[in-house]
Amino acid sequence: MEAMETVQSENISIRTHSLSNLWSTAERGGYPAALWRLPRANEKQLIIDLSSEDRRTKVDLEELPAGFAISPFLNPEGDQTRFLRADLYFSFDSEEHLIAEKTSPSADFWRIQAFEDDAFEEVDAPDYNLSPIPLDLESLSEREKFEESVRQAVTEIKLGAFQKVVLSRRKWVKLPAQFDHVAAFHRLCEAYPHAFISLVSLPESACVWLGATPEILVSQDQQGIFRTMSLAGTQSALDQNNHPIPLDQARWSHKEIEEQALVSRYIIECFKKIRLREYAESGPQTVKAGNLLHLRTDYKIDTKAVNFPQLSTVMLDLLHPTSAVCGTPKPSALRFIEHYEAYDRTYYSGFLGPVNVNNESHLFVNLRTMKIEGDQAILYAGAGITESSIPEQEWNETELKCQTLLSALL
């Protein structure tokens, strides 16, 4: 990790640190923090920003120091990405043993000492359950509003306004008094080994974001391999008898195939804009993401071979927001979303992930996510609307997507 060095001083004692205690200390101190686990990995990584600043920036993956980025859905100038600097970095193995601990030279050591002096008592995580708010007129109105927006979108598509638009909605749940953020994170890690699991504390906004997203936006590893994907089309991973559907037996409708193809074409058009032809494409294939199946096409580029070290930053600017969370064409789809959704998505369907941590950057689309404020959580889910969309089915799709989080937390 650039600009980071292993701490061997007495300011931090490896023996005293546990993941839960570090997170709790950061929350009590009002320090922004991010905890994550990459797909198909066992290692859990935590950074803490000791500045307590609400740092907004434009993501330049070649220039930023080690840290964690979280960007809103609407970021037209690209400069509203919240960046958490990795003043403190910790890595834990699958048994939650501390395996690495680093600090940036800019860290204030008197603040680091505060972590050492705090009381790190091991406590059992409390039992917890999510209790959905009972259905009432407000939640019925939410459904009616969503289904009406789907009908309006289909009408606009038939009139030629756009080919696809992604509409989202919210679901409110009541959290127990002693809801444990880190315990919920661990639960998601166990339930979704192929997803990017994240927990981000933003004290200046008095909220925590928890999520399990299956979709890479841009990724570049130590070898300079760039990756992105088109992920669209959704169906339950269980058949009518509640049995798992084998991936090779999944059947996709014309609407779902078309929806995924639009996202793939959008990515290829971005490659064409920068005159890049040397990419490897594989798919589409059926993949499982928790309780759902999706169609996915993967794209890979060797940035060293094509002599394009800035590719990840360039593609990030071109891709976000992708047609998988916005629509096609983007400008007209965005106008429809802003008019009919009538609420601020904030970080839902934006992107988030580690930047220049251990010389790698992995940014994911912020899907399957919830915003936690006090004892309430707001879940977000969306559906891609095409000419073949049926409002009731699109609502049911969003309910399935909400279950990605609810089923792991109940």
Image (cartoon, helix red, strand yellow):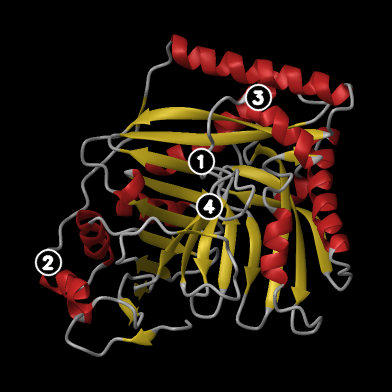
Q: Say which label, 1 or 2, has the lower sequence index.
A: 2
Q: Residues within 10 Å of mark 3 (few under 14, many from 20)?
A: few
Residue occupying image coordinates x 54% and y 80%: 359
> Mark 2 is on which residue type?
Asp
Tell me the mark number nearer the camera, choosing from 2 and 4: 4
Q: Secondary structure at mark 3?
A: helix
Q: What residue sits right under mark 4 in the picture? A: 80
Percent coordinates x, y for residue 39 in the rendering = 55, 63
Q: Secondary structure at mark 1?
A: loop
CA gap, disc 1 and disc 2: 34 Å
135 horizontally vs 98: left or right? right
Q: Say which label, 2 or 4, has the lower sequence index.
A: 4
Q: What residue sits right under mark 1 in the picture? A: 346
CA gap, disc 1 and disc 3: 16 Å
Q: What residue sits right under mark 3 in the picture? A: 339
Q: Nearer the viewer, residue 288 or 351?
A: 351
- The reply to whether dot 4 and dot 1 touch (C-beta < 8 Å) is no
- The reply to whether dot 4 and dot 3 touch (C-beta < 8 Å) is no
116 horizontally vs 33: left or right? left
Q: Is residue 385 above or below residue 291?
A: above
- The reply to whether dot 2 and dot 3 touch (C-beta < 8 Å) is no
Tell me the mark number nearer the camera, choosing from 1 and 2: 1
> Mark 1 is on which residue type?
Thr
> Mark 3 is on which residue type?
His
Q: What residue sits right under mark 2 in the picture? A: 118
CA gap, disc 2 and disc 3: 49 Å
Q: Secondary structure at mark 4?
A: loop
CA gap, disc 4 and disc 3: 22 Å
> Mark 4 is on which residue type?
Gln
189 horizontally vs 75: left or right? left
